[in-house]
């Protein structure tokens, strides 16, 4: 399944199911086939995504520091970071918020 996020203010954004579910979970939306993010909900959604990115980066930095402190090889992380995955979504939400347009999916 694909999640296709649409808005009148931006182009469509298509996410694979795992990434779409992760995105919706991070912003506190129910993981459903259809939905809407109203313009007034976008600042909170953007903050939630930015907080999740900061948390992931902090956890990774701590894991690397602990490995180095114990003389171990630092762990390798997924090829695409949460920061990279959320960048297009955050951009879309910011532009839609400025335009006062909702983002919908599944319609």
Image (cartoon, rainbow, N blue to C red):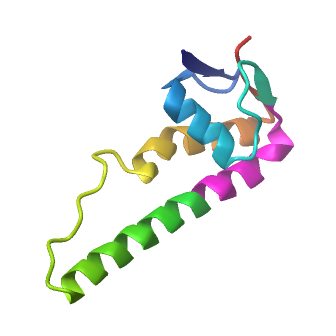
The image quarter containing residue 36 is: top right
**In what quadrant of the picture does the C terminus appear?**
top right
Q: Is residue 45 magenta?
A: yes
| Residue 45 shown left or right of residue 73 in the figure | right
Q: Position of residue 90 (x, y in %)?
A: 58, 45
Q: Main secondary structure of the magenta part?
A: helix
**In what quadrant of the picture does the N terminus appear?**
top right
Q: Position of residue 6 (x, y in %)?
A: 66, 20
Q: In the picture shown, does residue 22 fall above or below 105?
A: below
Q: Nearer the viewer, residue 64 or 107?
A: 64
Q: In the picture shown, does residue 5 fall above or below 62?
A: above
- At 60% across and 40% down in the image, what residue appears? 23
The image quarter containing residue 33 is: top right
- At 66% across and 51% down in the image, what residue appears? 46
Q: Write down the region rendered in magenta.
A: 37-50
| Residue 10 shown left or right of residue 41 in the figure | left
Q: In the picture shown, does residue 18 fall above or below 47?
A: above
Q: Is residue 86 magenta?
A: no
Q: Position of residue 106 (x, y in %)?
A: 70, 14
| Residue 30 shown left or right of residue 5 in the figure | right
Q: In the picture shown, does residue 93 fall above or below 51?
A: above
- At 53% across and 25% down in the image, what residue appears? 17
- At 71% across and 31% down in the image, what residue appears? 31
Q: Nearer the viewer, residue 67 or 48?
A: 67
């Amino acid at each position: 399944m694909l999640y296709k996020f649409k808005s009148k203010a931006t182009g469509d954004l298509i996410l694979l199911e795992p990434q779409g579910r992760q995105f919706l979970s991070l912003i506190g939306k129910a993981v459903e086939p259809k939905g809407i993010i109203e313009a007034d909900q976008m600042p909170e959604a953007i903050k939630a995504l930015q907080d999740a990115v900061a948390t992931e980066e902090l956890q990774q930095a701590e894991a690397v520091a602990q490995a180095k402190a114990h003389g171990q090889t630092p762990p390798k992380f997924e090829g695409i970071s949460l920061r990279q995955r959320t960048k297009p979504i955050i951009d879309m939400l910011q532009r839609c918020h400025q335009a006062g347009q909702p983002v919908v999916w599944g319609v």
